[in-house]
Image (spheres, coloured by chain):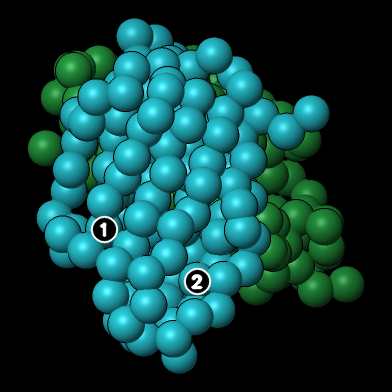
Chain colours: A green, B cyan
């Protein structure tokens, strides 16, 4: 079956630090990959996505590249802000009659001023 | 104009009670889901409905029963609530035949059983 393994948190960084959150996956076929973000007290929002190998998803300064050879989709940001403090979820979705999002365990990020 | 809306946002109830959470989406999606998020933020899918038909029913107690009156609504009814049911429940929707498109989530319902 499909699975997503995500870097465990919590992660605490100072403002303007570089962020990497690791994500690897196991899936049959060619899944689409997503990063979702959950701000305190809110639901999940799509942050970025990539639908095929070597695609790079980007949004709000965050980037992730779909690496089929390493089955990875690591999230990066060059300079984090206090407002980036949230829980980040890596997820995958694949074709099939029972398509569903498979989520990683989430990584809590806290950015200190 | 909210895409996926759930009510209520907060629900505090006593053990043994029966409660319902409602969900509606205005995106025209054909698939809706219920997820449970525990205190460690782990998300677990509970149910998935496609065009009002159940397509995923993960191992959840049969006290949980989803109901989809039409493809824009998926309600979750919980009987005989237990302390362990306390969690945040998220409704989501997506288009089944397009895995490249993302799922949209509601704001969540924080259920507290006392």
Q: Residue at x 55, y 79 (%)?
A: B12
Q: Quadrant of residue A85?
A: bottom right
> Can residue A12 be seen in the rendering of this structure?
yes
Residue A35's x, y, as percent? 52, 39
* Position of residue B56 in the picture relative to residue A63 (left or right): left
Q: Quadrant of residue A26?
A: top left
The residue tagged 1 is: B64
Task: Say how many tags the image has.
Answer: 2
Q: Residue at x 24, y 24 (%)?
A: B53
Residue A15's x, y, as percent? 83, 64
Q: Quadrant for the N terminus of chain B, please.
A: top right
Q: Nearer the viewer, residue B28 or B15?
A: B15
User: Is residue B53 positioned above or below A75 on the image?
Assistant: above
**Are there few (<14), some (14-19), or many (20+) residues within 10 Å of tag 1?**
some
Q: Residue at x 30, y 29 (%)?
A: B49
Q: Quadrant for the C terminus of chain B, please.
A: bottom left
Q: Residue at x 64, y 60 (%)?
A: B9
Kindly report the distance in space between the C-alpha atoms of the residues bearing marks 2 and 1: 13 Å
* Position of residue A2 in the picture relative to residue B71 (left or right): left
| First reached walking from the N terminus: tag 2 or tag 1 | 1
User: Is residue B52 positioned above or below B11 on the image?
Assistant: above
Residue B25, disc = none
Residue B111, disc = 2
Q: Nearer the viewer, residue A69 or B41?
A: B41
Q: Which chain letter matches label 1? A: B
Q: Which chain letter matches label 2? A: B
Residue A72's x, y, as percent? 36, 36
> Can residue A9 be seen in the rendering of this structure?
no
Residue furthest out toward the right? A113
């Amino acid at each position: 079956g499909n699975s997503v393994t995500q870097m465990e948190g919590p992660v605490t960084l100072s403002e303007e630090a570089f962020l990497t959150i690791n994500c690897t996956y196991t899936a049959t076929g060619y899944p689409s990959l997503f990063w979702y973000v959950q701000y305190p007290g809110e639901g999940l929002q799509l942050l970025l996505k990539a639908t095929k190998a070597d695609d790079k998803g980007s949004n709000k300064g965050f980037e992730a590249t779909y690496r089929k050879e390493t089955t990875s989709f690591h999230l990066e940001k060059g300079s984090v802000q206090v407002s980036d403090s949230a829980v980040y979820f890596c997820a995958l979705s694949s074709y099939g009659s029972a398509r569903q999002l498979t989520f990683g365990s989430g990584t809590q990020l806290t950015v200190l001023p | 104009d909210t895409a996926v809306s759930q009510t209520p946002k907060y629900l505090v109830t006593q053990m043994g009670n029966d409660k319902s959470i409602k969900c509606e989406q205005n995106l025209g999606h054909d698939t809706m889901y219920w997820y449970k998020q525990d205190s460690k933020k782990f998300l677990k899918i509970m149910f998935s409905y496609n065009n009002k038909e159940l397509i995923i029913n993960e191992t959840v107690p049969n006290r949980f029963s989803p109901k989809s009156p039409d493809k824009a609504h998926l309600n979750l009814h919980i009987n005989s609530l237990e302390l362990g049911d306390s969690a945040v429940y998220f409704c989501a929707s997506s288009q089944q035949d397009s895995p490249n498109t993302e799922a949209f989530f509601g704001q969540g319902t924080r259920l507290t059983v006392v």
